[in-house]
Structure formats: C-alpha cells, structure tokens
Image: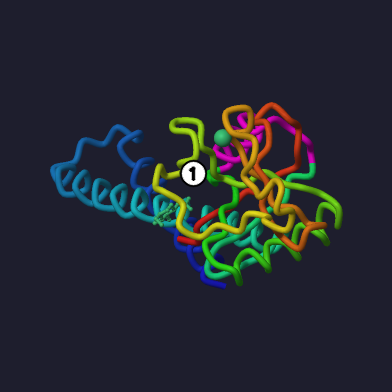
Amino acid sequence: MEFKGVFLLLGILFLVNGSFQQRPSKKKPMKKDAGKDSAIEGLQKQINDIVQELNLLKEQQALQTVCLKGIKIHGKCFLADPVKKRYHSASEDCNALGGVLSTPMSEDENNQLRDYIRQSIGSNEQVWLGINDMATEGKWMNQTGSSVFYKNWDTSNPRSPQPDGSKSQNCAVLSGSSGGKWFDENCRDEKPSVCQFNIV
Ligand SMILES: *[C@@H]1O[C@H](CO)[C@@H](O)[C@H](O)[C@H]1NC(C)=O
Ligand SMILES: [Ca+2]
C-alpha cells in the first residue's frame, strides 16, 4: 500500500515536471524563468529522493521475497541452494546475491537451519557452512573474519572427533543426517549450501 502511494506521487511529479519543461519550448521568453528553474530543480530533487526511497523499498521487498522463498530465523533470512558446488563457488554465488554462507551462532539457530536443510535440500544432505580454517590450521573463522564462538562439531566417534582432517580439510559442513552436527571437509568437495541475508 505504501508502495502504491510512492508510485502515485512519482507519477504526479513526473507530470508536473513534464508540463514545466514543455513551456520553454514554445519559445516565449519569460522573465520568470529563474523562478521556474528553481521550482524544477526543487521537483527534481524531490524526484531523486523518491527514486532513492523507491530503490530502498525494492531492496527490502526483494529481501522479503528471499525470506518468503526461504526461511526467517532470528532476524536473518536463509535461502537454500541445492546445487552442489565447491566451497569457493558456493560462497561467491551467495556473495553475489548480497549474502554470506550460513553460519548459525547458537544451538537454536543451528537446529532451525538443520530442519530447513532437511525439508528444502534433503534429510541426508551436508551443506557448506560459512566458516573455514584456511588461514591458520585449527582456527575457524567466519565470513566476516572473526573467530567462531558457537561450534557444533560431531564428537560421537571418539576415535575421530571432528574436526579431524587437519590441513586437507579446511571447510565445514552441517550434516542433516547427524542431527545438525558439523564435520570438516575438503573445500573442493561439491556440496549444496544455504545463503544467509541480514534483514535491513
Ligand atoms: C562472525 O563472528 C562475529 C563475532 O561473533 C559476529 O559478530 C559476526 O556477526 C559473525 N559474522 C557472520 C557472517 O556470521
Ligand atoms: Ca583444517
């Protein structure tokens, strides 16, 4: 509804602006041209402001669509990408959409993400998480370059508690079949992913 109003206002301003611009073309020199110019300038500024606002609304609406297609968890939107890709491709494709690979920061967020993965991608799938220990072995960093505090590594196998891949496995997945537990994997493996967007 707010949207409609903006369009209407935009339309009116374009009409008004258009009728101002037509007059000088009649080649009747007028003394009040200066006043008219500043009026047009004022309108132009208002139009620019409205266009800016409209773009913002469009962005917000696009995000709403992402949320509608995906899921909203704790003020963030998550959208599944079932296409299997290497970690870097998955990350780049997600960045291009304005998001980062999903990185749950609490048990509740992790559980909700696990459930979303099960129903959108598949119950036995593993998806890339937005963390890696490429820079320093064993130091897991998130997509904004901070150390990861919440972790959910699978430690059910005492002989190989995760992460167990040392330098050959610097990326991590969330496993739908292991109750949302995390495993380190080779970044060149091809996995589905979930892209995460902050709600503005
Ligand atoms: C990375 O971790 C920091 C510190 O916990 C947090 O503030 C930031 O939101 C995290 N970034 C992502 C993309 O999860
Ligand atoms: Ca590693």
Pick the front one: 72 or 126? 126
Q: Quadrant location of residue 154?
A: bottom right
Pick the front one: 29 or 44? 44
Q: Is residue 91 located in the magenta-colored stretch of the structure?
A: yes
Total labels drawn? 1
**Does 83 sit left or right of 105 as displayed?**
right
Label 1: few (<14), some (14–19) or many (≥20) C-alpha neighbours in 10 Å: many
The image's colour scheme reads rainbow
**Does 66 sit left or right of 124 as displayed?**
left
* Residue 135 at x, y percent in the picture: 44, 30
Does the closest atom of ligand 2 sit within 8 Å of the Cβ of label 1? no
Looking at the rendered structure, the secondary structure element under dot 1 is loop
* Residue 177 at x, y percent in the picture: 82, 57
Amino acid type of the residue that numbered disc 1 sits on in the rendered structure: Trp
Secondary structure mostly seen in magenta is helix
Residues shaded magenta = 83-97
Q: Residue at x 82, y 49 (%)?
A: 125
**Does 126 sit left or right of 185 as displayed?**
right
Pick the front one: 17 or 58? 58
In the rendered image, the quadrant that contains the C terminus is: bottom left
* Residue 98 at x, y percent in the picture: 53, 44
Q: Quadrant location of residue 16?
A: bottom left
The residue pinned by badge 1 equals 140
Q: Residue at x 68, y 62 (%)?
A: 113
Q: Is residue 34 located in the magenta-colored stretch of the structure?
A: no
In the rendered image, the quadrant that contains the N terminus is: bottom right
Q: Residue at x 60, y 60 (%)?
A: 77
**Does 26 sit left or right of 181 as displayed?**
left
